């Protein structure tokens, strides 16, 4: 069998020579016959004729010989493809249009897949990924650094452990953005890693070396960094002699020992430093000593043959030891959960995709698939219409003996040709797009290159598209009664076409409604945040990670406030735990006594800086002791006291108590605070359906610096132009302490950043929605113009009989009644549950919004009618005589 | 009557192939002499349209039962010589048995009818 296959291949590779030799052989045969005939007495001419007669049909023989060597199906398929190509030459507009639609549909899906794959799915490219796991402390990911001393070879599951500073840490997350060089604005993603990091992960340096155990983690080792190729190319101009040079990270000098390729896990990092040297790079940091911090990520290399399931058991002795040593940090219920490389080391309890995208990758891909569905429905319609037009052509083939399966195959081959062509175009588009994205995109280096996974995805999606586009028309045609007498009109009316159009209309409606929902909630969140953030700048200085003690931090902030207050442009300042988000915060507590309410600790002057009106009483002053006084919103006041006249009454802070660690002040249940003011409810105005109360307490001056809420933000209101004082704010902070990294920006900028996620989804949805609608319009156009072609004689007769153009126009537009009404009804209905998919976004989305449903409905209707009008108008404008002669 | 229609040799499938294999079992021959042998040994009953030999030969080549080599004919012409391969010999034996069995079966039916 195998030999036969090889012989066939050999024949095919040499098929020209083989054919020539066969021809030569047959001719030689004939000449021998002729010679023999001449010998027996015939003249040369007679012998020549007789020999030819004796040979029979030599051409047919040669053809048969060739057929023996070929696979019949292969030859047939080639024939089908040739037919398809001929068709392409005959109807280039159809083919180009169709492949354009399909390329867009496929391209968007390939791009989406590649994005998801690069960010969330593709396992990191490391050595032996099947034996590498990350250990999560349940329920959160990070572990305190001191614990790492206990992670040694003394266990049954792991041969070695790898440590990386935890970029997800609440207290140390900002360690991962360090200043590169001299310009404080120039920050790069950085990680502190154990010295076996690169070696264990199997990452080879492109230049120089990676960290070495015993060298870079030795006591007194010179400070070193490894940099990523991306950083090397972008910030160092691909300096060929970078290895051995000194660079500045966090304003500390260090020697570059190596450059690693860009696809290093985790791929966003640009600079790596030995974790043993963290005290040099970040002086005074409590990183290495504190047990309360989620400062590091721990990875482990499993010993050969150790199954993942046995990891927890194997680590139990170690965890028991930790518990004995640090009972506060590790309770009975804390355990270590392994997450394998194949899951991208993701926390099994949280989806990192949802954090980045706001929706799950499946939802996102589902939305892009909708566009492909529309494109396929559209093309199916087109192919179907064309097949109907070709009915006569096909009938002739059937009557000449072509089997129905043969006809089906031919139609499928055309679809396949279309899909293959479009896939190539789509791949080229995506590839180009990726290159552009990489060239001008954000300063990150995850792998966006093409992988075989992308190609496989394309093939899979493409095959589905072939089936979707080709099967129905092929089946339909082959089932119909094909005879030469059949006219296209007979098969022309099919119940499939309106259904396909309805599907397109429905999907477009769905996408547009989702777009509208996100747009609206974005607008709402911008319009009314309950305070005035124009001309407010915010200054943050990460003191905790620089090792400031509580008293030092307080005096630093006090000095800074005094300095800034004396600035002529500064109107007022206020210290807050973190800069206000401008987002709906949700309830911090919800007790029977209070109902749902938000909770904020704010410094004196907060309400003045943000221009939040005080409805009654006063706001916090510097003399208000922490926990002694509160400010309420009317909703909360009504709930607790049954009145808004509450100044001077005592609010039972103790009965709210510790609520998820939010209220720190009330240690005793009997504790109360005096109400000193009333201020409006938070949220988005009176129409807010989720109206909640608000409780404000004055800022705790003794900040617990080990906790995640240890740092502060300073809000500054400018007299005229906040942009003008941003620079001065930063300088003021620097003047107090040169070793710090203060950041100043407009509060509005902060808001923008937080809305970026919703904005990104909005952009994607808007692109998808408009694409969907454009494709649907092409579908509407096609359907109406096809109907107009089919009914041309009828239109001609009607016009000749004097019927008004308008009524004929209506007749044609009536084609759309069924598909439009059904499509819109189902699409808009489906949008209501689909809106729930967006609930993960940080701007809240109201899934049921009748205004948007109505607007989208009208918009789609008008667009569809507009698309239908052109071909319909063309049809009725024709001279009736031309119409009548058309058939 | 001469059987000139090549298909008549396919009355029983593979008959032509079998005959060619048999003729080649005596040694290497080119297409013309295969046709001559076929004619003479069947007392001129089996006269195929001579070119229809060639699809059959190609089929034998594809199956690996014969192999072909270019050589020079007795009257100094370039000609392709076919020889039986080892598998070809096995195939000849098997096909012959099968053919005999078939003919016997047909004979039996014809005689008992």
Image (cartoon, coloured by chain):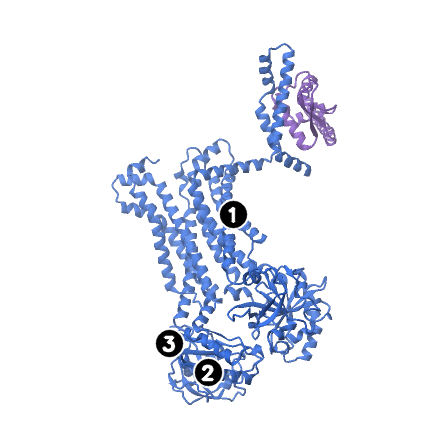
Which of the labelled discs sits on residue A516, or is there none?
Answer: none
State the residue position of label 1.
A424
Q: Disc 2 on helix, strand or loop?
A: helix
* Chain corresponding to purple in the figure: B
Residue A38: percent from left, percent from top? 63, 12
Q: Chain of mark 3?
A: A
Q: Residues within 10 Å of mark 3 (few under 14, many from 20)?
A: some
Residue A638 in which image quadrant: bottom left
Alpha-carbon distance for marks 1 and 2?
A: 63 Å
Residue A479: percent from left, percent from top? 48, 40
Q: Colour of chain A?
A: blue
Residue A414: percent from left, percent from top? 49, 41
State the residue position of label 2.
A563
Residue A608 lies, with reference to residue B85, above or below; the image says below
Upstream in the sequence, badge 2 or badge 3? 2
Residue A669 lies, with reference to residue A887, above or below; the image says below
């Amino acid at each position: 069998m195998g030999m036969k296959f090889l012989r066939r291949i050999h024949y095919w590779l040499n098929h020209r020579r083989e054919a020539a030799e066969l021809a030569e052989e047959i001719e030689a045969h004939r000449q021998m016959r002729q010679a023999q005939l001449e010998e027996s007495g015939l003249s040369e001419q007679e012998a020549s004729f007789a020999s030819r007669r004796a040979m029979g049909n030599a051409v047919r023989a040669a053809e048969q010989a060739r057929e023996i060597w070929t696979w019949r199906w292969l030859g047939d398929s080639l024939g089908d493809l040739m037919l398809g190509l001929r068709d392409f030459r005959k109807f280039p507009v159809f083919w180009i249009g169709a492949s354009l639609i399909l390329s867009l549909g496929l391209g968007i899906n390939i791009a989406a897949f590649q994005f998801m794959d690069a960010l969330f799915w593709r396992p990191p490219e490391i050595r032996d990924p099947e034996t590498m796991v990350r250990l999560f402390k349940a329920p959160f990911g990070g572990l305190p650094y001191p614990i790492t001393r206990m992670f040694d070879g003394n266990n049954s599951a792991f041969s070695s452990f790898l440590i990386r500073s935890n970029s997800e840490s609440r207290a140390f997350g900002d360690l991962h953005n360090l200043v590169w060089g001299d310009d404080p604005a120039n920050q790069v993603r950085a990680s502190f890693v154990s010295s076996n990091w690169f070696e264990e992960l199997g990452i080879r340096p492109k230049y120089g070396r990676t960290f070495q155990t015993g060298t870079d983690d030795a006591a007194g080792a010179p400070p070193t960094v490894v940099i990523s190729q991306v950083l090397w190319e972008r910030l160092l101009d691909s300096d060929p002699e970078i290895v051995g040079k000194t660079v500045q990270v966090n304003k500390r000098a260090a020697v570059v020992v190596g450059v690693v390729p860009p696809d290093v896990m985790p791929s966003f990092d640009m600079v790596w430093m030995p974790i043993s040297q963290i005290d040099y790079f970040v002086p005074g940091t409590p990183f290495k000593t504190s047990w309360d911090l989620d400062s590091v990520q721990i990875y482990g290399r499993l010993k050969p043959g150790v199954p993942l399931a046995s990891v927890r058991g194997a680590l139990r002795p170690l965890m028991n030891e930790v518990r004995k040593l640090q009972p506060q940090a590790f309770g009975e219920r804390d355990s270590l959960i392994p997450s394998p490389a194949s899951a991208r080391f993701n926390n099994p309890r949280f989806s990192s995709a949802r954090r980045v995208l706001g929706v799950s990758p499946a939802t996102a891909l589902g939305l892009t698939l909708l566009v492909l569905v529309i494109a396929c429905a559209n093309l199916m319609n087109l192919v179907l219409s064309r097949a109907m037009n070709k009915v006569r052509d096909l009938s002739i083939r059937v009557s000449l003996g072509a089997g129905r399966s043969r006809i089906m195959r031919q139609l499928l081959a055309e679809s396949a040709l279309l899909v293959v062509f479009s896939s190539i175009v789509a791949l080229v588009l995506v590839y180009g797009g990726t290159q552009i994205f990489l060239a001008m995109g954000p300063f990150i280096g995850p792998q966006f290159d093409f992988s075989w996974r992308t190609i496989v995805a394309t093939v899979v999606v493409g095959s589905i598209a072939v089936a979707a586009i080709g099967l129905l028309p092929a089946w339909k045609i082959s089932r119909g009664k094909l005879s030469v007498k059949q006219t296209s009109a007979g098969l022309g009316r099919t119940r499939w076409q309106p259904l396909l159009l309805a599907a397109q209309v429905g999907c477009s409606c769905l996408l547009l409604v989702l777009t509208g929902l996100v747009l609206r909630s974005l607008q709402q969140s911008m319009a009314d945040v309950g305070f005035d953030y124009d001309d407010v700048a915010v200054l943050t200085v990460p003191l905790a990670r620089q090792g400031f003690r509580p008293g030092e931090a307080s005096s630093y902030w006090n000095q800074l406030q005094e300095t800034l207050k004396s600035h002529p442009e500064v109107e007022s300042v206020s210290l807050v735990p973190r800069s206000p988000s401008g987002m709906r915060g949700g309830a911090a507590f919800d007790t029977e006594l209070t109902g749902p309410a938000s909770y904020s600790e704010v410094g004196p002057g907060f309400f003045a800086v943000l221009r939040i009106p005080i409805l009654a009483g006063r706001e916090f002053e510097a003399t208000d002791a922490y926990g002694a006084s509160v400010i309420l919103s009317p909703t909360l006041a009504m709930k607790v006291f049954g009145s808004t006249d509450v100044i001077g009454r005592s609010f039972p802070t103790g009965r709210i108590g510790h609520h998820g660690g939010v209220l720190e002040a009330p240690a005793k249940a009997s504790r109360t605070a005096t109400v000193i003011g009333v201020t409006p409810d938070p949220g988005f105005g009176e129409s807010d359906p989720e109206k909640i109360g608000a409780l404000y307490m004055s800022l705790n001056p003794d900040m617990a610096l080990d906790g995640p809420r240890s740092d502060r933000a300073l809000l500054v209101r400018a007299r005229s132009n906040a942009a003008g004082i941003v620079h001065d704010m930063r300088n003021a902070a620097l003047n107090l302490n040169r070793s710090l990294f203060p950041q100043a920006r407009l509060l509005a900028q902060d808001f923008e950043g937080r809305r970026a996620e919703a904005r990104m989804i909005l952009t994607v949805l808007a692109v998808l929605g408009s694409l969907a609608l454009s494709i649907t319009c092409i579908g509407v156009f096609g359907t109406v113009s096809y109907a107009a072609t089919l009914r041309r004689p009828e239109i001609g007769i009607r016009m000749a009989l004097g019927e008004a153009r308008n009524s004929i126009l209506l007749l044609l537009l009536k084609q759309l009644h069924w598909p439009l009404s059904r499509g819109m009804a189902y699409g808009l209905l489906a949008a209501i549950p689909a809106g729930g998919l967006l609930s993960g976004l940080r701007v809240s989305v109201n899934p049921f919004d009748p205004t948007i449903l109505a607007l989208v409905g009208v918009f789609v209707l008008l667009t569809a009618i507009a698309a239908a009008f052109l071909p319909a108008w063309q049809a009725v404008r024709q001279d009736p005589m031309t119409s009548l002669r058309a058939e | 009557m001469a059987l000139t229609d090549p298909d008549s040799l396919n009355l029983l499938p593979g008959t032509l192939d079998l005959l060619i294999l048999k003729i080649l079992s005596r040694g290497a021959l080119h297409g013309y002499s295969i046709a001559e042998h076929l004619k003479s040994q069947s007392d001129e009953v089996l006269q195929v349209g001579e070119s229809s030999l060639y699809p059959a030969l190609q089929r034998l080549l594809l199956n690996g039962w014969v192999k072909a080599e270019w050589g020079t004919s007795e009257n100094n012409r370039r000609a392709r010589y076919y020889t039986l391969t080892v598998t070809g010999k096995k195939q000849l034996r098997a096909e012959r048995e099968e053919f005999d069995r078939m003919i016997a079966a047909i004979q039996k039916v014809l005689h008992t009818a």
